[in-house]
Image: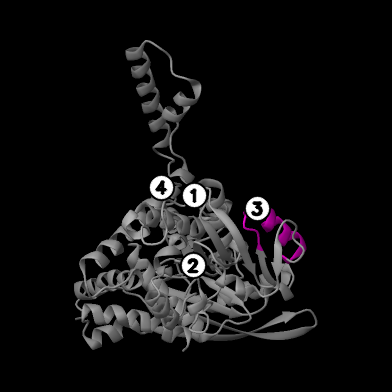
């Protein structure tokens, strides 16, 4: 079963639960547009031809939103599936975007900075000329193989193609902060993973079956220490006192039941380009076996289809948290549910990136950073509160307590607050829907049901049906 077929099968469970008319289900579930591009670029003394895609799954809200990944395995099916997940994800967390996704079939490690910039800018020009890059209609973001640097190149390319568009910075999100980006975007997806997990562990009815207590000292296996996995693991370790007992990477798995130091592992990978040889841990070249380790929580944060029908029966974690897109196939999901495992679905768990991308897009459209107008007012108001407390108590407050009261929220504070609120509301919505509807047996179906209901309402409002 292809990636797109897996996504469609999961969505179909929600359509069945909602008894959605077949025509409407087809309209919501299908991909609206797919652009395939082939373009030449001079690389050294020869010309290379690159193939890329940009899919728009839904434009019921504009702009359509979704990342661009640079990977040798990128293909049209993957791009269409990821675009579909973006549609449902945005609807679930109340981000007013449609779903889109892009991919370029390339191994970025084979090219130097100048060559990669030339390729990226050419790709951006082609997307813009075909109407698949615009602050109003289609807004990319970083994904696998891309980051702030590539987004800055794309934004600058769009600016030169459209010099009269004063909102040009909003044509992409995930940019460097000093080029129109927003504080907190780099960590957003990983932080959103942690926020979703915290909400899950706050609900004792959910955890009492197999995971007593909170996140503290839970034994966690994480697959992939890229941007998402690194920030999620680091936060879980430093703020929630969880134990990261295993980290799975491309060349194997590191294991230490006492806990791995995430920051040290990341630094080792950056320096040596491998986890092999890392001290204070046991190494196994069979990374896939790490998914089957005895643990409390498994967090696949790498690629799609890592847990399939072949290995689902051997997964021992009672909680699987989908930090990647589509890491558990539809068939594997059914096996895990039968075994009593809980799966926190990707369209909720990794929505933090698009939530903060939305904040960045709004910031760019409004041409003002968050907190600029109210921060000093909050601080002055805080001083008034401190003065009132000290007058009534006839005793001065400590300097640290006074600072906590007086301090106004900066942009990062507001971004994290908005992200936390969004993730909490979305989790509670799917949990409540699952509990009150017998046709919705699990959190994944509930997440799709919640998203599809919102999309259906949008179609109804504009008179599509």
Residue 30 included in the magenta stretch of the image: no
Q: Residues within 10 Å of mark 1 (few under 14, many from 20)?
A: few
In-front residue for pair 14/419: 14
Could you tell which of marks 1 and 3 lies nearer the N-terminus? 1
Magenta extent: 255-275
Quarter holding the C terminus is: bottom left
Name the residue at 45% across, 31% down.
407
Q: Position of residue 13 (x, y in %)?
A: 31, 80
To which residue does mark 2 refer? 317
- Element on which disc 4 rests: helix
**Which numbered dot is residue 417?**
4
Labelled pair 1, 3 in contact (Cβ < 8 Å): no
| Side of 296 relative to 91 (left or right) | right
Q: CA distance from mark 4 to mark 1?
A: 22 Å
Could you tell which of marks 1 and 2 lies nearer the N-terminus? 1
Q: Does the rendering let one see residue 344?
A: no
To which residue does mark 1 refer? 216
Could you tell which of marks 3 and 4 lies nearer the N-terminus? 3
**Which numbered dot is residue 263?**
3
């Amino acid at each position: 079963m292809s990636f797109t077929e897996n996504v469609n099968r999961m969505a179909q469970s929600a359509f069945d639960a909602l008894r959605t008319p077949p025509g409407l289900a087809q309209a919501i579930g299908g991909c609206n547009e797919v652009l395939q591009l082939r373009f030449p670029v001079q690389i050294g003394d020869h010309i290379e031809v690159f193939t890329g895609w940009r899919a728009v799954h839904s434009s019921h809200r504009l702009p359509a939103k979704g990342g661009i990944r640079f990977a040798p395995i990128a293909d049209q099916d993957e791009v269409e599936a990821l675009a579909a997940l973006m549609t449902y994800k945005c609807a679930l967390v109340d981000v007013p975007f449609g779903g889109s996704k892009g991919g370029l079939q390339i191994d970025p490690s084979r090219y130097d900075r100048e060559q990669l910039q030339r390729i990226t800018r050419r790709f951006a020009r082609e997307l813009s000329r075909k109407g698949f890059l615009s602050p109003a209609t289609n807004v990319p973001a970083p994904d696998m193989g891309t980051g702030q640097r590539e987004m800055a190149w794309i934004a600058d390319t769009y600016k030169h193609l459209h010099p009269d568009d004063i909102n040009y910075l909003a044509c992409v999100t995930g940019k460097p902060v000093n080029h129109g980006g927003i504080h907190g975007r780099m960590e957003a997806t990983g932080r959103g993973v942690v926020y979703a997990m915290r909400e899950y562990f706050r609900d004792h009815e959910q955890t009492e079956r197999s995971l007593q207590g909170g996140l503290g000292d839970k034994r966690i296996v994480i697959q992939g220490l890229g941007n998402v996995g690194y920030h999620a693991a680091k936060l879980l370790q430093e703020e929630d006192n969880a134990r990261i007992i295993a980290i799975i990477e491309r060349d194997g798995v590191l294991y230490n039941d006492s806990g791995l130091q995430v920051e040290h592992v990341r630094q080792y990978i950056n320096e040596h380009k491998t986890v092999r040889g890392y001290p204070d841990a046991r190494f196994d070249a069979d990374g896939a076996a790490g998914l089957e380790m005895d643990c409390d929580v498994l967090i696949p944060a790498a690629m799609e289809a890592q847990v399939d029908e072949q290995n689902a029966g051997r997964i021992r974690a009672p909680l699987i948290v989908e930090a990647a897109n589509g890491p558990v196939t539809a068939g594997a999901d059914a096996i895990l549910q039968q075994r009593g495992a809980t799966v926190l679905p990707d369209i909720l768990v990794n929505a933090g990136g698009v939530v903060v991308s939305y904040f960045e897009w709004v910031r760019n459209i409004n041409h003002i950073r968050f907190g600029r107008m109210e921060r000093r007012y909050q601080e002055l108001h805080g001083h008034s509160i401190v003065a009132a407390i000290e007058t009534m108590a006839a005793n001065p407050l400590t300097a640290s307590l006074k600072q906590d009261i007086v301090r106004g929220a900066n942009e990062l504070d507001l971004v994290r607050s908005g992200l936390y609120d969004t993730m909490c509301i979305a989790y509670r919505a799917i949990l409540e829907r699952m509990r009150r509807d017998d046709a919705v047996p699990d959190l994944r179906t509930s997440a799709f049901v919640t998203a599809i209901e919102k999309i259906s309402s949008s179609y109804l409002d504009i008179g599509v049906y």
